Image: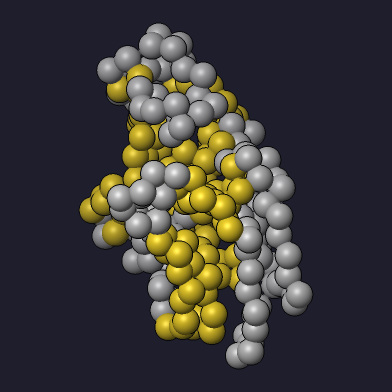
Amino acid sequence: AFISIAPGSDNSVGLVTRYSGPGEQNFYLAEARGTAGQVTVSIYRNFQGSYKLLAQTTAAGSASSTEGLGLGSTEPLTGTLRFESVGGSHRLFFNDTLMIVGHDTLVEGTASVGIRSNGHAGILVDNFLVETLVPTQAALPHANDFGTANHKNLGREYTEQVGHIVVDNGFATNFSSLAVATLNGVNVGDMTLGADTMMMYGSGASLSLLGRHSGEGEGTGYLAEMLAAPGQGDLVTFN
């Protein structure tokens, strides 16, 4: 939906998924709120009337986390707010740029969607649109050069089991401290996996390929991992 909200107004507007009610109960909310001189975007879970914050950032945050906001201290936030709930992954986009991701599975099943607003001045909503997100089943052999535009999802042929991975500058990269994504529709025992990689030595980061994954989250399977061990300081690439 297109939204317009003034910084500092303490008004809010948001999109709601998996609403089962009654009243203000049992749903997920992607919200933009005008706070002192800025706009805060948040993802909440509401279960039996109690809110839990899943993720949040503000227009005063880092450039990487607020790319695309284009917000001054007194200008209203205007643009397209999008909220995706797929399994336990809940993503807030602004002007097609991923801002924050929350993970939660407490509110499950099919239910209604809608709009939540709080405050009567300085809020505009237009062009409300609802679409079904249908996962795509992958076929083998599968190849992906991650050549989509920046700050995009991996694609609907992947299920994010933990965290979130985005595509930036032709690479898949972490949007969270830990991320696990699996390919839909693949159920094989004997396989070979490969990918070109780039990591900074000494960062302590790791990158892995998963085989025979089953279950939810990190689940069960085999892991081939590269670890950028501390104490070294060069950029390393592998293929």
Q: Is residue 234 above or below residue 125?
A: below
Q: Which residue lies furthest to the top in this view?
A: 74
- Of 223 and 187, the residue lying toward us: 223
Residue at x 46%, y 83% (from the top left corner): 221
User: What color scheme is it?
Assistant: secondary structure
Q: Quadrant of the N terminus?
A: top right
The number of discs equals 0
Q: Quadrant of the C terminus?
A: bottom right
- Residue sitting nearer the eye, 17 or 237: 237
Compared to residue 235, the image places residue 74 above or below, namely above
In front here: 140 or 85?
Answer: 140
Question: In this view of the protein, which residue sits in the foreground, 220 or 48?
Answer: 220
Q: In this view, does 143 lie above or below 210?
A: above
Of all residues shown, which one is farthest toward the left? 50
The residue at the point 65 percent across, 79 percent down is 192
Residue plotted at (54% across, 80% down): 211
Q: Please determine whether, in this image, residue 126 is positioned above or below residue 18.
A: above
Q: Can residue 111 be seen in this view?
A: no
> Whole-percent x and y of residue 63?
44, 26
- Quadrant hosting residue 185: bottom right
Taking 155 as reference, is 70 left or right? left
**Residue 150 visible in this rendered orientation of the protein:** yes
Residue at image coords 39%, 44%: 233
Q: Quadrant of residue 103?
A: bottom left
Q: Where is residue 195 in the image (x, y as percent from the top left)?
A: 63, 63
* Residue 77 image offset from top left, x and y in percent: 48, 21
